[in-house]
Amino acid sequence: MTSTHPESGPAELAGLLRTQGDLTDPAWEQAFRRVPRGLFIPDAIWAPDARDATWLVRVERDDPYWSQVVYSDSAVATQADDGAPDGPGGRGRYVTSSASQPSLVLRMLDALDVGEDSRVLEIGTGTGFNAALLAERLGGPNVVTVEVDGQVAAHARERLAAAGLAPTVVVGDGARGAPSHGPFDRVIATVAAGPVPYAWVAQTRAGGVIVVPWGTPYASTGLLRLVVKEDGTASGPVIGRAGFMWLRQQRGLTGGWRTYVDTSAPVETSASTLDPDDILRMDSPARFAVGLRVPGLCQVDFHASDGSGEYTLWFYDGSGAWASLDYVPGAGEYVVEQHGERRLFDEVEAAYRWWERNGRPDCERFGATVTANGEHVWLDRPECVVS
Ligand SMILES: C[S@@+](CC[C@H](N)C(=O)[O-])C[C@H]1O[C@@H](n2cnc3c(N)ncnc32)[C@H](O)[C@@H]1O
């Protein structure tokens, strides 16, 4: 649901965010009022096709939807399919760049906890709007932003110049950080990661903060807030939900599930009492936990159209292994089929039971420690490593 101020503009958007309780820091409010979001949004944006929401359609600036969505508390899809949409009639399939939802932008900036002269690295320039807010508050020389897509970066650079702001825009793989521009006091990733690239820790001063949407592509991501220590590691908890697109190289499997699931293959059949409703929604706590404990897991669901409430879950990992579970409301026990070397459903069930035994934790009970040798996921305390 989009909440829009009746008269749309930067001041009205700031007012709306203040009313919602998202804009509490006067310094960010000043930046928000000075930086017009609309300046950073391209003339053509993307919206779900009203006739078939599995596709995206292009919407031009003169369409009323454009200004309605730009000055509302909504994410704006600004690129489809890495800039090369090839669906019928020019339609796109996946959003690959966007201006994040303003209330989420503010939540992340608050979590970043900048000082007035903090030097900040942003990963995922996108439209340049977040970099503009940072540059407005901290000054252009204190802000470096990295974007993997050359066209997206060029648009952001041009818009930032039009706004009179001059952060450094680097085109490249943000997973490497910006080594020649560091060290930084803060790193903010506006693109999801898991594991967190160690380069970000290495380029941040001790005591510095890293804010990053984190988890696995199996579930909606949580917002991880790491503090960098003297020993060169960084650790911290998930502080809330923050659904984001993934770093390009961590996107997980692309392509339809049929690419990875051969339903004619021999299967092993069993039964399970696992309640699949708990792992149906992307933002369910169980799903966040299961994703962390079952590497590479993907899932799709198909629902019966006869009103019976029945559905089938398909699990796969790209290796050829797959599993399915047929849900029938009220049955209490469900038929499971598995194929391949990896018994994917057994792994899902073990992870789910672990989640139950540990009090059904929500994502905020998880955290991570990032070291030069890898990332450790923990529950409640850094000593309680779970994967
Ligand atoms: C949600 S958008 C960023 C929103 C942006 N901060 C803004 O204010 O508009 C995520 C961006 O991350 C970029 N991205 C994806 N993978 C990346 C990578 N490995 N390095 C740098 N940028 C990446 C995408 O191209 C996309 O533009």
Image (tube, grey):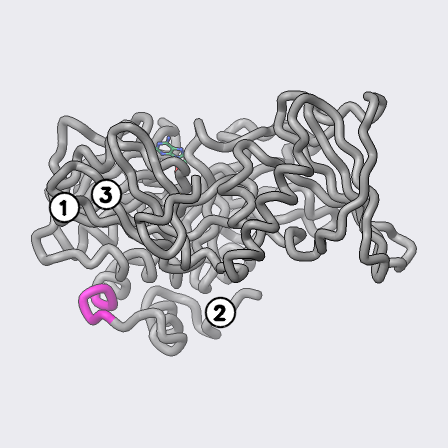
Q: Which disc number belongs to residue 185? A: 1
Q: Horizontal placement of 120 versus 39: left or right? A: left
Q: Residue at x 17, y 42 (%)?
A: 166
Q: Which residue is mark 3?
A: 234
The part of the image, by quadrant, that contains residue 161 is: top left
Magenta segment: 25-30
Task: Say whether residue 68 is magenta.
Answer: no
Q: Horizontal placement of 65 versus 13: left or right? A: right
Q: Residue at x 50, y 57 (%)?
A: 358
Most common secondary structure along the magenta stretch:
helix
Q: Is residue 329 above or below residue 186?
A: below
Q: Which residue is mark 2?
A: 4
Labels 2, 1: front one: 1
Which percent across, then down, holds residue 123? 30, 39
Q: Is residue 270 above or below residue 213?
A: above
- Mark 2, ligand 1, within 8 Å: the answer is no
